[in-house]
Amino acid sequence: MRPRGERRATMMDGRAAAESCEVLTRHGRAVTVVPSDVEYLRHPTGFPHDLTTAVPLLLHADVDGLDAVAWGAPLEATYRLQRGRFRDYARSPFIAEWGPAFAVLSLPVCVPTAGVSEVVTSAIVQQHQMGHVAQSCVRGSRLGRPCGRCPKCARKDLLSFAVSGRWPTDRAIERQWRGREARQHLLVEPMKVEPVLAHCAHRYLAEGGRSALLRSVAAKAGPRTLRGTG
């Protein structure tokens, strides 16, 4: 939430997330929303560390009787799977640097989706009766209305197409990925979340897609690797 008198601009918009929490509450799920302005403590605005999102949880740990700190990072993010690369999660900053601090608070780090590919989590979202409340975009102002321009929207939309098998036109795909931020994710070496992009690109081509951009993604990533995901 924006502090009173704060004039600095930010691309983040928490209204869609708040709507998701409201929907979950109406369906009988136990949800606690903790107002926070922690992203305004730094210049420029934003989260200074991946673990910053745990601040409200730590402040409520005793009140709510919590016994772990959990994130929903999927397989690729947890182990930083890339072409020829792998991160031992036990040596990541989450565990190696901050694990002892969380342990002192009796809040060990838990990543329940660490063994599940983002392709599979996307399939779960599409099939689950509450899947419509899952929205990864942090810039869209309404639930069900992601911004459609950020890199996360580009990847999540591509995943949704790959999982469902319902592809938009080649032009629509290329228009979304040719935005400056999304394009930058394809230009780095290796590409960000490369196994997921590779899976989507190869599936798209196998189903007759003709986008030159996704053909380039497939060529850059090499042979398809997530064969067990459909």
Image (spheres, helix red, strand yellow):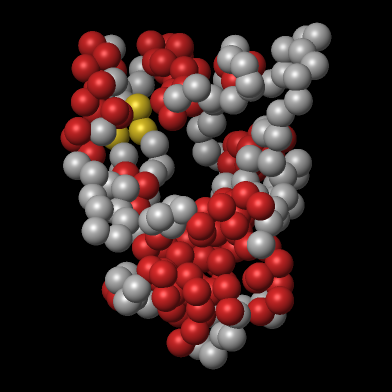
Q: Is residue 156 above or below residue 150?
A: below
Quadrant location, the C terminus: bottom left
Q: Is residue 218 visible?
A: yes
Quadrant location, the N terminus: top right
Seen from the viewer's position, the closer of residues 50 and 108 is 50
Seen from the viewer's position, the closer of residues 136 and 202 is 202
Residue 220 in percent (x, y) is at: 41, 70
Seen from the viewer's position, the closer of residues 171 and 152 is 171
Seen from the viewer's position, the closer of residues 228 and 134 is 228
Relative horizontal placement of residue 64, taking residue 181 as reference (left or right): left
What residue appears at the point 24 percent right and 58 percent down from the top-left corner?
Answer: 84
Q: Is residue 180 above or below residue 112?
A: below
Relative horizontal placement of residue 172, taking residue 115 as reference (left or right): right
Residue 208 in percent (x, y) is at: 54, 90
Numbered marks: total? 0
Relative horizontal placement of residue 225, taking residue 179 as reference (left or right): left
What residue appears at the point 34 percent right and 53 percent down from the top-left corner?
Answer: 76
Residue 225 in percent (x, y) is at: 30, 71
Residue 28 position by quadrant: top right
What residue appears at the point 71 percent right and 67 percent down from the top-left corner?
Answer: 175
Residue 32 in percent (x, y) is at: 54, 25
Q: Is residue 33 above or below residue 155?
A: above
Residue 64 position by quadrant: top left
Q: Is residue 78 above or below residue 148?
A: above
What residue appears at the point 31 percent right and 48 percent down from the top-left corner?
Answer: 80
Q: Is residue 106 visible?
A: no
